[in-house]
Amino acid sequence: MHGVRALLTPAAFEGVVATVIDNNPGMEERTAERIVTEALKFVEAAARFPNDNITPSNVVDEGWHALILHTHLYKKLCARLGRFVHHWPERPDTGRHDRHVLAHTVTIIERAGHSVDRELWRGPTTASVLTAARCSHTPMPGGCGPINPGNCASHCSGGEGGGDQ
């Protein structure tokens, strides 16, 4: 699926972008748009490949959080994608970051037909874009990942607020 912004109406997309900006004072609108676009790619890929162990970067997680805060919109988005993509956060822990899972996520998103904004798909150690998102995720049973393969998709990432792979 190309053109993930088409998954939302322009007004809905703008609303999610506004939430990212509200949660990250001083962030430029264009940066927030990029983050939300990457979050849409992530959710679409997670729904399409529910048995793959994938994780958003912390920067992209900020966009995913904003989507989820728009609960009605997120429910409709997941229904349109054919699968609800769950989010189970954990307390921040950069030690759980697995650069291989993040790299695999990029591969899965590309396999879903998307190009990725690589600046936004870095690990937690060297921030390129700072965000307020501070939850952390482990792509393993009991943490995050396909907890219930075939029934739902659950995907997440580790670390603190953006950075380098």
Image (cartoon, rainbow, N blue to C red):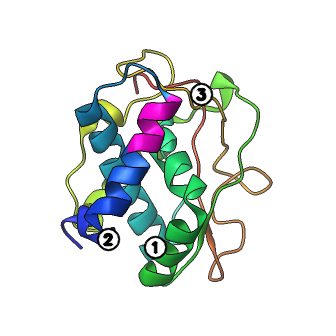
Identify which residue is drawn at 24% across, 47% down: 116
Q: Position of residue 62 (x, y in %)?
A: 50, 39
Region of the chain picked out in magenta, as a range: 18-23
Which residue was labeled with disc 2? 7
- Is residue 99 placed above or below 8 in the rendered structure? above
* Count of numbered tags: 3
The amino acid type found where label 3 is placed reads: Gly
> From this viewpoint, which residue is outermost toward the top?
126
Q: Position of residue 71 (x, y in %)?
A: 60, 64
Q: Could you tell me if residue 27 is visible in this image?
A: yes
Among the two numbered marks 1 and 2 on one chain, the one whose residue lies closer to the N terminus: 2
- Is residue 64 placed above or below 40 in the rendered structure? above
Q: Is residue 21 magenta?
A: yes
Among the two numbered marks 1 and 3 on one chain, the one whose residue lies closer to the N terminus: 1
The amino acid type found where label 1 is placed reads: Leu
Identify which residue is drawn at 71% across, 66% down: 147
Q: Position of residue 102 (x, y in %)?
A: 45, 42
Residue 90 placement: quadrant? top right
Which residue was labeled with disc 1? 77
Closest to the observer, 79 or 28:
28
Q: Residues within 10 Å of mark 3 (few under 14, many from 20)?
A: many
Q: Are marks 1 and 2 in contact (CB under 8 Å)?
A: yes
Identify which residue is drawn at 48% across, 45% down: 56
What quarter of the picture does the C terminus occupy? top left
Which residue was labeled with disc 3? 159
Q: Position of residue 122 (x, y in %)?
A: 39, 30
Closest to the observer, 67 or 149:
67
Among the two numbered marks 3 and 2 on one chain, the one whose residue lies closer to the N terminus: 2
- Badge 1 marks a residue whose secondary structure is helix
Residue 136 placement: quadrant? top right
